[in-house]
Image: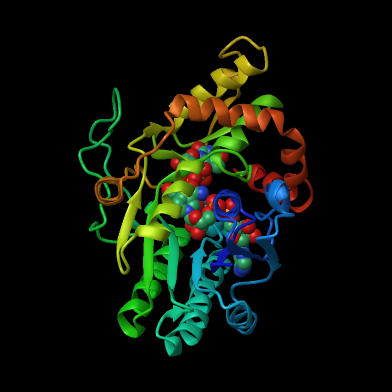
Amino acid sequence: MKRTILITGGAGFIGSHVVRLFVNKYPDYRILNLDKLTYAGNLANLKDIEDRPNYTFVKGDICDFESVSGLIREARVDGIIHLAAESHVDRSIKDPFTFAKTNVLGTLSLLQAAKDFWQPLGYEIDGVPCRFYHISTDEVYGALELTRPEGKAPYGDDFFTEDTKYNPHSPYSAAKASSDHFVRAFHDTYGLPTIVTNCSNNYGPYQFPEKLIPLFVNNIRHRKPLPVYGKGENVRDWLYVEDHARAIDLIFHEGKIAETYNIGGFNEWKNIDIVRTLIRVTDRLLGRAEGEDDNLITFVTDRAGHDLRYAIDSTKLSRELGWKPSLQFEEGIEKTVRWYLENQEWLDQVTSGDYQKYYEQMYKNR
Ligand code: NAD
Ligand code: DAU
């Protein structure tokens, strides 16, 4: 094998797309997927590639420094793509400690383990330069104004660039921001070859149905209420998950060490407009009259500290590395809704048991 790459959080939503892309595209790379399999990790996301000779799943916790160190050392890992995290803002509001532990201490544990193994080798293994690639989020930059709330996107004049000052508001984004700082500190202090990317909201297959798009498609199908926070005026910038995975592949191979790249689709949507689109597409694909389920929209108490608008400027990534999103939103949403409707078994499996109890509790309290 030419290289050994450790992908953390590979059983989650984005991680599973990254693992699939690397396993298929690089048969001469050995891909290790380290995942704790929390409620959000599901090996069913990787059924199609689980028997590939260049793929190995390792169940483990990134916070377990001894095990992580042993794995990196024994497998002679030369590249790390770090996605493992607690990722849901609503959960972080209820339980910030878990977010600090996984997102901050887990990242620190990986950084230290990589540094301990790589530094004495001059950050090169068998002629291959080492690389620690940390996947972060646009939420670390805080929130933008909605200076043009009416009409079409963009809904404001400013965008998050790589130079925007960090200003996180939720325990989730505070923990991600802290992990980003640790990654950069390991570069500046020890010379660890790091890269950080900050991406906007992803959508597509295999997203855990506590997040807006899969939750609402599933609820429309079952004619359950659609809990829209506040007035649905918040704006998010949406990117198809496979386009994010392609960006990660490109940046892992061609990005410059110590750099930050923003990833986004210049695709801003107000939540309420996304919800209406989801109802229209889901109704049509189910053979119902389009918009028939508009009455499921239920405005509920807003999320605490709800960031108003995210909008990513990904010009640097397109200018320097030539990346651009491949899918138009209308096409991506249609593909996504179709996937959830055709994969009810997957949805049932991941929404059973503990998660179901958690969701009922959350919804009852609103
Ligand atoms: P996810 O919640 O779907 O998956 C997270 C994965 O990490 C799961 O498989 C889980 O089992 C694993 N994990 C959690 N704690 C772990 C631990 N202690 N040790 C090992 N594995 C652990 O998350 P996602 O939406 O795929 O996000 C992946 C990464 O991308 C995160 O770092 C997130 O902050 C970032 N991100 C997500 C988005 C988005 O829209 N989803 C956008 C930008 C950045
Ligand atoms: O911006 C990138 C981030 O996108 C990632 O870092 C996070 O890991 C990911 O979860 C996502 O965060 P959001 O909070 O934006 O995603 P979520 O799907 O939870 O919510 C999207 C928007 O929809 C947000 O404004 C809140 C709103 N919402 C969400 C849910 C779950 C509702 O109105 N009702 C809901 O039930």
Q: Tell me: residue 279, above or below residue 311.
A: above
The colouring scheme, among rainbow, by chain, secondary structure or one colour, is rainbow
Residue 257, by quadrant, is bottom left
Residue 62 locus on image (x, y percent): 59, 72
Residue 198 locus on image (x, y percent): 38, 55
Asked if residue 304 can be seen in this view, the reply is no
Residue 347 locus on image (x, y percent): 72, 39
Residue 6, by quadrant, is bottom right
Q: Nearer the viewer, residue 251 or 173?
A: 251
Q: Nearer the viewer, residue 236 or 48?
A: 48
Give the image quadrant in which the ligand numbered 1 is located.
bottom right
Q: Nearer the viewer, residue 159 or 17?
A: 17
* The N terminus sits in image quarter: bottom right
- Horizontal side of residue 153 vs 82, given as left or right: left
- Horizontal side of residue 35 vs 184, given as left or right: right
Q: Which residue is at 20% across, 38% downward? A: 157
- Horizontal side of residue 180 vs 313, given as left or right: right
Q: Which residue is at 26% across, 56% downward? A: 162
- Horizontal side of residue 300 vs 208, given as left or right: left
Residue 250 locus on image (x, y percent): 40, 53
Residue at the extreme bottom of the image, as rendered: 120
